[in-house]
Amino acid sequence: MSTPSSSQGAPLATEKRETFSSRKLFILSAIGSAVGLGNIWRFPYVAYENGGGAFLIPYLVAILCAGIPLLFLDYSIGHRYRGSAPLAYRRANRKAEVLGWWQVLICFIIAIYYAAIIAWAAMYCWFSITKAWDKNADGAAGFFMNDFLKVSENVNVGFDFVGNIFIPMFFVWLVTIVIMVAGVNKGISRANAVFMPLLIVMFLILVVQSVFLPGAIDGLNAFFTPDFAALSNPAVWAAAFGHIFFSLSVAFGIMVTYSSYMKRKSDLTGSGYVVAFANSSFELLAGIGVFAALGFMAYNAGSSVDEVATSGIGLAFIAFPTIVSEAPLGALIGVLFFGSLVFAGLTSLISILEVIVAAFQDKLGWKRVPATLVVGIPVALVSLVLFPTTTGLYLLDTMDAFVNQFGILACALVMVIVFGAGLGMLPKLAKHLNRHSSIKLGTGWKVLVGGIGPAALGYMLINEIQSKMAESYSGYPVWFNGVFGWGMAGALIVGAVLLSLVPWSKNSKIDDPEFDQHRANVEAEEVPEASGKEY
Amino acid sequence: MSAIAIVFMIISMLTIWGGLAISLISLNRHPEKHDDDVIEPAGSAGN
């Protein structure tokens, strides 16, 4: 690892902390993490459903008032305390370590099902060429549920494996673990440096091809026509805040971990703006590509865009295959679309797994390779046991819904309260961000993170609790949602408490001369007053 | 496409893609600094 920063202090018990070798690689990796499946299959429908073109207004407000300020909170903690989520929080305050483990466990849950979706997308690249779904009498929907996933009629957890899913999932995990073993510079950076440009080029070709399909203009018309009445609906604003929050990968440890690998004199806020706007830029592109394709689908079916518009798994694995079968050069559309899902998913999965690997590396003081293998292989095994089965879809659906709301969202709310009102750390963190950043933060940032943040997150969480309590999620049996939804979300908190009680080993990074030097340098660099342009 | 949809498409592109362009230009105006691991006196770290 060649990094300009080299500690000349006392010899370290463990290897030196890795750093991204350049700002460009950090930004690329952070964008790789933020741009995931949600940008492609979630944003277009959320925007369409919540005011079309008018959604831009709450969306921009949400980016500037919640997304970017929370991103900076993550950056400041990770960069100042230079550790994985549990270590960074513990260095901020001993009792905050538990929050870090909560985020690690959230990432564990997301990682185990995320890999399944990437594997499905990889298989659908191939199916786009063979048009495998054309042989099913019920079309793409029948093929996906019956021929491909072989979904069981009973909502349960079974171990009836589906080879067509197990094998690609195995390779997804193999690729991910190989990348992670190689470390921050040789693995994560390089993977993002290859996958991200590839993703952008593939997606651009897809968008260009889609907008020239017959009916595409109707799709774009539906996507961009503003519904101004939506702006007076609080649910639309909540949707914007909720979407931005999930889209930017804030408050679940990823950005804390990645920013801990940034050099000391990094322009944190300047880089953060690039990451946030790059993420949104990709989403906008996805909106155009997806709605142009849906416009074609509606045109071909003689229906309206409203009738075919959908999101998530339905969009990717049912609507898109239909478009692939019907469109000119459909196979190319399919390969580009599903290939984009694979690359966007892989770069996000890498960042999710890194939260877990880094946490155990810090706590146990292990080197990169053993830590990655000891963490990565069990995570992969759990994923390979639970998801390539005939009941995997049910588990994925429930876990995804509950970990998002009662994992990420709840943890984010606790995090902003703890670091804002609880520990009163925002002035210190703002000062940290202002050391070398091109955009200075002032009172505005503290108000947004300490005030608007908890209010918006609290409102969303209450709404979610009410809706999930009102009826059984997806109509699944109460026991199923109880165990794998509510129970899983609760178990994450219990697990986090237990992990935070495990003592730090003698070799761990808790006493690290390299960090002591970093802290001394950081404190020496702090300017007393924020100057220049303030947020 | 209706006129209003075109207008909103252009506004969306200008604000979001324009926002990315401005962020990139702004970041490039502040070249990357290199860590030297020397403790500097407070206030000497300019922009």
Image (cartoon, coloured by chain):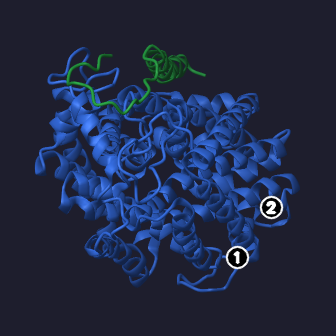
Q: What residue type is labelled 2?
A: Trp
**A148 relative position to A314: left or right:** right
Where, by quadrant of the figure, is residue A2 drawn?
top right
The colour one sees for chain A in the rendered image is blue
Q: What label does residue A224 carry, if any?
A: none
> Is the residue marked by circle 1 packed among few (<14), some (14-19), or many (20+) residues within 10 Å?
some
Q: Nearest the camera: A223 or A102?
A: A102
Screen quadrant of the N terminus of chain A: top right
Task: Please state the horizontal and vertical placement of residue A122, each as a whole percent of the image.
Answer: 73, 57
Task: Please state the horizontal and vertical placement of residue A461, each as a whole percent of the image.
Answer: 27, 56
Q: Nearest the camera: A67 or A512?
A: A512
Q: Nearest the camera: A89 or A290?
A: A89
Residue A291 visible to the viewer = yes
For image coordinates 31% across by 57% down, the residue present is A87
- Figure check: A280 above or below A104: above
| SS at circle 1 | loop
The answer as to whether the residues below labels 2 and 1 share one chain is yes
For image coordinates 44% across by 36% down, the residue present is A5
Q: Which residue lies under the disc numbered 1?
A: A150
Q: Which amino acid does label 1 sit on?
A: Lys
> Is the residue marked by circle 2 packed among few (<14), some (14-19), or many (20+) residues within 10 Å?
many
The colour one sees for chain B in the rendered image is green
Q: What label does residue A133 carry, if any?
A: 2
Q: How far apart are marks 2 and 1 (CA)?
A: 13 Å
| Number of marks drawn | 2
Q: Could you tell which of marks 2 and 1 lies nearer the N-terminus?
A: 2
The chain holding disc 2 is A
Task: Please state the horizontal and vertical placement of residue A97, each as a whole percent of the image.
Answer: 26, 61
- Figure check: A348 above or below A360: above
